[in-house]
Amino acid sequence: MYLAGIIVFLLMAGMLYVRLAPTDVARWHQPIEAAQSADLADGAVRVIAADEQSFERVAQAATSLPRTEVVAGSVAEGRITFRTRSKWIGFPDFTTIEYDNGTLKMYARLRFGQSDMGVNAARLEQLLGAAQSG
């Protein structure tokens, strides 16, 4: 019984940490170095030729995703980083989008763990749809 209480306490403490851990903006709001699209164990990158309006549509679409907020940046800056939390536990994923000289780059990655099970790639595919809908 005592062991079960310790396990429950540790699980609750871990969930609380995931929810309340501060975000180091300087770590997550970085230029995207990738030159081509890729699926990674902890996220995904998409790189496409696009115009400024596509970037604006993607920014708007990202803002409207559930449980998503802007962490840093703006359309005027040419780079925006968003934090999207999972529905049940609130795991944070970070998505950075940037536009420069005809290229739109998007990088979505997890903060905790080693595998996102394709969630970030799916999010980027959804945002690509917004980019290409104009």
Image: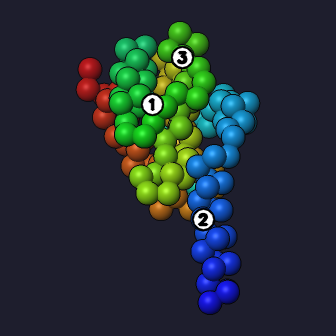
**In the structure shown, which secondary structural element does the residue marked by tag 3 occupy?**
strand
Q: Residue at x 62, y 90 (%)?
A: 1
Q: Which residue is mark 2?
A: 12
Toward the viewer: 91 or 106?
91
For residue 40, say whether it is visible.
no
Please determine whether, in this image, residue 12 is positioned above or below residue 122.
below
Toward the viewer: 100 or 30?
30
For residue 19, say whether it is visible.
yes
Q: Nearer the viewer, mark 1 or mark 2?
A: 2
Tell me the CA gap for discs 1 and 2.
41 Å
Task: Residue type at mark 3: give it.
Answer: Ser
Q: Quadrant of residue 34?
A: top right
Which label number is shown at residue 74? 3
Looking at marks 3 and 2 on the same chain, the residue that comes earlier in the sequence is marked by 2
Q: Residue at x 41, y 44 (%)?
A: 123
Which label number is shown at residue 48? 1
